[in-house]
Image: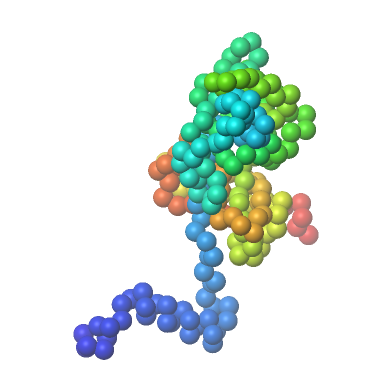
Amino acid sequence: MTAAAARYNPTDVEAIVREVLMKHLPGTVSKPKPNPLVVNISARHVHLSDEHVEVLFGKGAKLEVHKDLYQDGYFASKQTVMVVGPRKRMLPDVRVLGPCRPSQVELAFTDAISLGIDVPVRISGDHHDTPGCVLVGPKGVVELKAGVIRAMRHIHMGPADLEHYGVKNGDALHLRIESPGCTTVLENLVVRADPKVKLEVHIDTDEGNAVNLDAATKVELISPKPCACHKH
């Protein structure tokens, strides 16, 4: 190897070749993805309004950061509550996520069975015709008339991600997960657009366990295949 060649590593050479091809042969090289695809399991959790934080944890109480989440500005708080369903079935120590927002409880299907609640699959914030529960904290109790849901599997996308995948807010994509002995496609993940978010998929605990997500070797978003009835 000459001294001149030694100054370039393979990554540099690949970048230079890619740039030349992009300039002179449009369409021959795919556009790099703007953000890495991250798939996370969203375990059962609670969102609380400022008012309910004070009822459950005392006057003047604020959520305290226990661990930052993947999305900037969001966190798992130090605070937990007990979620109580019908016939006094309960889930102790359910984590509260911050920052504050309208109160809501997000469960996996098996959590709902444990509580004895028939929980609908909904987009976060859609509380229409949803069941309620009782939340118990160290300083008080809150009875929610509605707001217990199983969160619909979804994808957070910013503008660059929307452009790359050719979708808009409310559209759906499929998620293909390759894991040892358990390659699976989860269908109809709803796109949730926000200019401030990073690309991230959320599935619940049951779904994550079913696809063996912890052992996954590859994840990818794919477009739904057109229905055969649309063919002419």
Furthest-front residue in this view? 60
Picture quadrant where residue 63 is located: top right
Q: Residue at x 40, y 43 (%)?
A: 215
How many numbered marks appear? 0
Q: Nearer the viewer, residue 167 or 149?
A: 149
- Residue 198 rendering spot, x and y as whole percentages: 56, 56
Q: Nearer the viewer, residue 166 or 51?
A: 51
Q: Left or right: where does residue 125 sit relative to residue 97?
A: right
Q: Nearer the viewer, residue 212 or 65?
A: 65
**Colouring chosen for the image of the structure:** rainbow
Picture quadrant where residue 42 is located: top right
- Residue 1 rendering spot, x and y as whole percentages: 21, 85
Q: Residue at x 51, y 37 (%)?
A: 64
Q: Looking at the picture, does residue 230 appear above or below residue 144?
A: below
Q: Looking at the picture, does residue 100 appear above or below residue 81?
A: below
Q: Looking at the picture, does residue 1 appear above or below residue 180?
A: below
Q: Residue at x 78, y 59 (%)?
A: 232
Q: Residue at x 50, y 49 (%)?
A: 70
